[in-house]
Amino acid sequence: MSTVGVKDHFQDLVQEEIRCFSSIVPDPDIRTDRMTLGMAFMEHFITIFDQQKKVGFKPRVC
């Protein structure tokens, strides 16, 4: 899956150096092997669920 147009990383100035940070990070309070994608990620895609229990993503047009 491509995340073109999705802000999946940020830059910040830390101790006078530019550092990059991922916006998709693990939550230590959640103890599962599954991943939850929230609105910050999903707002850029149309999500399709099918009867074979598969999920598809398509970039939004509008």
Image: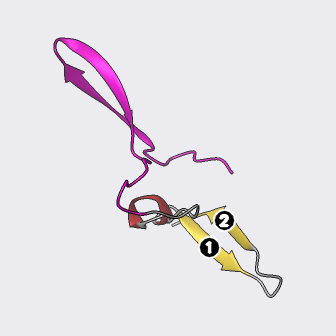
**Residue located farthest toward the top when viewing the structure as drawn:** 16
The x and y percentages for residue 16 are 17, 11
Residue 25 is labelled as: none
Find residue 50 and report its horizontal and vertical position in percent.
Answer: 77, 83
The structure residue drawn at horizontal position 66% and vertical position 65%, both measured from the top left corner, is: 57
Element on which disc 1 rests: strand
Q: Position of residue 40 (x, y in %)?
A: 39, 60
Which residue appears at 43% of the width and 50% of the height? 26
Residue 54: where, in percent of width, then height?
Answer: 76, 75
Question: Range of the magenta residues?
Answer: 1-30
| Up/down of 50 relative to 45, above or below | below
Q: Which residue is mark 1?
A: 47
Is the residue 48 above or below the residue 7 in the image?
Answer: below
Q: Residue furthest bottom?
A: 51
Alpha carbon distance from label 2 to label 1: 5 Å
Single out the residue that lies furthest toward the right: 52
Residue type for callout 1: Thr
Horizontal side, residue 62 vs residue 59: left or right: left
The local crowd at label 2, few if under 14, some if 14 to 19, many if 20 or more residues have their Cα within 10 Å, is some
Q: Quadrant of residue 52?
A: bottom right
Q: Quadrant of residue 19?
A: top left
- Residue beneath label 2, please? 57
Q: Do the residues under discs 2 and 1 have CB atoms within 8 angstroms?
A: yes
What amino acid type is highlighted by mark number 2? Phe
The image shows residue 1, relative to residue 61, as above or below, that is above
Crowd tier of the residue under label 1, counting other residues whose Cα lies within 10 Å: few below 14, some 14–19, many 20 or above: few
* Residue 15 placement, left or right of 37: left
